[in-house]
Amino acid sequence: MPRRHHPFLVAPLLILPLAGLPATALANGCPAPGQWQHDGEVVDTAELMADMSERRVVLLGEQHDRLAHHRWQLHTLAGLHARQPEMAIGLEMLPREAQPALDAWVAGKLDEADFLAESDWLGAWGYDPDLYLPILHFARMQRIPLLAINVTPALRQRLTAEGWEAVPASERHGITPPAAASTGYREALNAIYANHPSQGEYEAGLERFIDAQLVWDRAMAQGLAEATEEASLVVGLMGQGHVSYGHGVPHQLTDLGIDAVASLLAWGGDPDCTPPAGLADALFTLGDEAAFEPPEPQRLGILIAAHEDGVRVVGVGEQSLAEDLGLAEGDLIVEAAGRPVRQPGELTGLVRRQTPGTLLPITVLRNGDTEELLARFPLRGEAR
């Protein structure tokens, strides 16, 4: 159900290489868990953190629902902060409208419940806040500025549909039009779009998809670039699809004149112990963290988009709970669990919090008529 990120294809690296770091060739081709590597060689952690702390922007890519990724981000943030206390942290998770809530949180004026409510975390993002709260608490304890660098789905949709000239700068937070996507990025996005349910003419839909991704990338890149005017180091937390191979946000940062950029990713390895060439500046090797990950969240199995009257269904997965319910492309989900649904993240978060065996009432608007559906989430190991 989440419409987030996917692995991107191999393409030329657009970010700075690691310079002057001591490296050790891998004796058996496989780095040990906890080691950093670059170009097939292990690099010293202390030296790496020293080098990264001198960059203007460091990007930490994540898989949003992987607990191990957020633990790695927290440890890396602590290492960078020890070297460069004058840092700020930019968050993909929240749009700019949530900045007052972030400021109040860092200042110690909000508890967790109030912060989640005032930032509209579940509506804006939808992923379990428990995955992110250790990072948020670290920033609050150290009084590190937290920055909302995203934009709302509504603004992203408006810029994509109407064009940049039609939206006044004051209504788009002064964000400038993005640099064109590189050939490699277009190929990667095309591969992703090809796996989505068709929504009309393919080429037109693909261009809208790419344009929306560029809005997303540009908004975050500009937020990070603006933060470099006050912070000595700005660290961006975002999905790995915005970071990998120098596409996405690194590409937009270069267009904005921010050249000292580095991208770091957590990597779980593969049978050959060889990461794709040019994936990131450095990779942190994860061990097998499966036993420590939370259970898989619940999913309806639909692709959704923002709509002024609720959440629009734009695709239904085969053999999914949504298909069993009879949900169809074009349906509008207007209520869930008796509450109005305003944004995709709100529905996503509500579904992900359901426990096995529970029932979730859903109100759907279809062809002008309202229909009540009841989704039953199967017990663990139970066939639907």
Image (cartoon, helix red, strand yellow):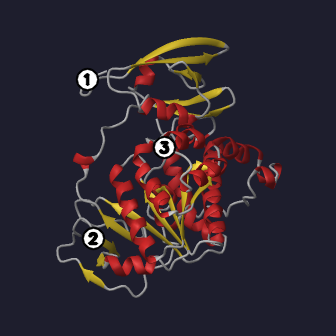
Q: Establish if 303 lies above or below 291.
A: above
- Measured along the vertical axis of the image, is residue 305 above or below residue 361? below
Residue behind mark 2: 35
Work out which residue is located at the far front of the displayed protein and give it. 109
Residue assigned mark 1: 382
Which residue is found at the position 62% from the left and 74% from the top?
Answer: 258
Name above or below for residue 194 compared with residue 373. below
Q: Give the alpha-carbon distance from disc 2 to disc 3, as whole Å.
A: 33 Å
> Does 292 sit left or right of 366 as displayed?
left
Does 173 appear above or below 224? above
Residue 314: % across, % down:
57, 31
Q: Which residue is most to the bottom?
A: 20
Residue at figure coordinates x 43%, y 65% from the top left: 77
> Can residue 198 be seen in the rendering of this structure?
no
Q: Residues within 10 Å of mark 2 (few under 14, many from 20)?
A: some
Marks counted in the figure total 3
